[in-house]
Image (cartoon, helix red, strand yellow):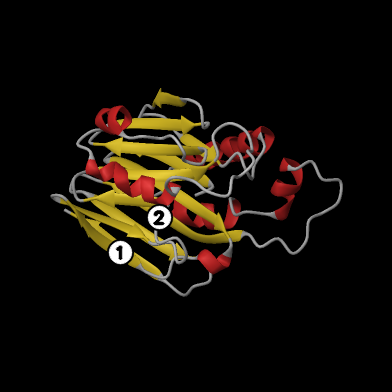
Amino acid sequence: MCTVTFVPTASGFVFTSNRDEDPKRAATQLVEEKRGDLLVTFPQDAAAKGTWIAFSDKDQFSCILNGAFEPHQRRENYSMSRGAMALAYFDYPTIDAFMDAFNFDGIEPFTLLLYNAGDFCELKWDEAELHVRKLSTKDIHLWSSCTLYTQEWWLDRTLRFKEFVSRQQPDQKRIIDFHANKLPFVPEALQARIDSAKPLTNIPLKTTSVSSIAQNKLGFNFYFQRTDGKLTTRKSTY
């Protein structure tokens, strides 16, 4: 939920997400859940039981990153977890319907990426206002959680990723490998984020998994890969 990329392809796209989290919250299973007439699939957070990435059998997905524009001070209580909100999106027929009807008050700041049958959108909530940006499915995109990465880190990763894509024209498997090996969380990122003069040690954070959705003419190919090797899952929707 902390470094996410989107790559257009000849048959659709590849959308990939690193989850940078406490390993105690690593997903232990892939869940299928009926929401109305949709079948929604997602890796489930072991602690909160929500998710950071989910997709349906109707050409939709959602993906959440922590924070909006700047790091924020966490409160003790929120009205709903961001992981639950990422699933609530599938209760609405369109992205616009979700934005118009959903109550974002009381939710911790987030960046939410939503896709629905070609409509691609970024929502940022800063606890006061919802900022909406329509996204092109013809461009390469990279996001990093503002709670862990500075703008400089985001720019460096964006340039390296775009160079990799332009040079290799990678398939889904190569993009997953790049995420796991070239874009994992490192303590130096958080050190720069908090402007610490000393290297950080004993940080309870690591890239616990890489999830990837590849759209083709038949549907989605989904890979979920834990970085500790304990769970690797593939699912296709047609």
204 up-or-down from 238: above or below? below
Looking at the rendered structure, the kind of residue marked 1 is Val
Q: Are marks 1 and 2 in contact (CB under 8 Å)?
A: yes
Residue found at the very far bottom of the displayed protein: 230
Q: Secondary structure at mark 1?
A: strand
Q: Is residue 78 left or right of residue 200?
A: left
- Would you place residue 216 above or below residue 49 in this image? above
> Looking at the image, which residue is at 33% across and 51% down?
54
The local crowd at label 1, few if under 14, some if 14 to 19, many if 20 or more residues have their Cα within 10 Å, is: few
Q: Secondary structure at mark 2?
A: loop
Number of numbered discs visible in the structure rendering:
2
Q: Residues within 10 Å of mark 2 (few under 14, many from 20)?
A: many
Say which mark, if any, is on residue 31. 1
Counting from the top left corner in percent of width and height, residue 230 is at: 46, 75
Task: Determine which of the numbered discs, if any, sits on residue 51 in the image.
Answer: 2
Q: State the residue at coordinates (67%, 37%).
A: 150
Front residue of 14/32: it is 32
